[in-house]
Amino acid sequence: MGVTVYSTSSCPYCTMVKDFLRKKQVSFVEYDVGRDERRAEEMVRKSGQMGVPVVDVNGRILVGYKPADIERALQG
């Protein structure tokens, strides 16, 4: 399973997403789009959004901190 979190260091909802995934023992790759312009462009291309967090669960793009949606995406 591939999970990617696009976030910024100052975003409280990004922290909540990462804490949620850790609690579920889901490994993920994190990109700080505030520091990595290439990853920021990738995030916008995938989501059509400038806001964070953006979570990519096996190609399913979720915007914002929505635990129920993340849970459903993780299940498959």
Image (tube, rainbow, N blue to C red):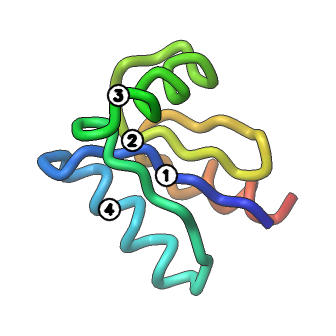
Residue 16, above or below 9: below
| Disc number placed over residue 53 in the picture, else none | 2
Does residue 8 appear left or right of residue 45 in this picture? Answer: left
If you read the primary sequence from the N terminus, does the residue marked by circle 4 or circle 2 appear first? 4
- Among numbered discs 3 and 2, the one appearing first in the sequence: 3
The mark lying in front, picked from 3 and 1, is 3
Which quarter of the image is occupied by the N terminus? bottom right
Check disc 3 and give the amino acid type: Glu
Tag in front: 3 or 2:
3
Question: Are the two marked residues, 4 and 3, in contact with CB atoms closer than 8 angstroms?
Answer: no
* Residue picked out by circle 4: 16
* Tag 2–tag 1 contact (CB < 8 Å): yes
| Residue for point 57% across, 82% down | 24
Q: Say few, some or many: other residues with alpha carbon within 10 Å of mark 4 (under 14 / 14 to 19 / 20 or more).
A: some
Which of the labelled discs sits on residue 5, or is there none? 1
Q: Residue at x 53, y 62 (%)?
A: 29
